[in-house]
Amino acid sequence: MGRVKVNLTLDGDVAEAARALGLNMSRLAEAAIAEAAKIERNRLWRAENKAAIATYAEEVANDGLPLTRFRSF
């Protein structure tokens, strides 16, 4: 998609500190937003698959890990 311009409002002291340190605020904001999106996608996936995860955990608790007999360690 490429890069797009967005408006972002920051605390003045935060912006000034970043400028004084020569930090690239756009790249920092992009990295933070990407990380937040990843965390939220993972949270949503876990919520959507909660029943299946619980069922699998119960199976492992009752029967052990599948293919355990083939482990060489």
Image: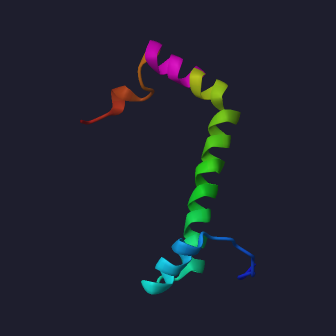
Count of numbered circles on the image: 0
Vertically, is 38 above or below 13? above
Q: Quadrant of the N terminus?
A: bottom right
Magenta stretch prevailing secondary structure: helix
Any part of residue 22 in sight: no
The residue lying furthest to the top in this view is 62
Q: 65 or 58, which is in the foreground? A: 58
The percent coordinates of residue 25 (x first, y second) are 56, 79
The percent coordinates of residue 10 (x first, y second) are 63, 70
Residue 67 lies in what quarter of the image? Answer: top left
Residue depicted at x 52% and y 18%: 59
Q: Is residue 9 magenta?
A: no
Q: 68 or 27, which is in the foreground? A: 27
Q: As drawn, is 72 to the left or to the right of 16? A: left
Q: 46 or 7, which is in the foreground? A: 7
The percent coordinates of residue 54 (x first, y second) are 58, 22
Residue depicted at x 45% and y 27%: 66
Vertically, is 25 above or below 56? below
Q: Quadrant of the C terminus?
A: top left
Vertically, is 54 above or below 42? above
In the rendered structure, which segment of residues is drawn in magenta?
Answer: 55-62
Q: 20 or 62, which is in the foreground? A: 20
Q: Is residue 56 magenta?
A: yes
The percent coordinates of residue 69 (x first, y second) are 35, 26
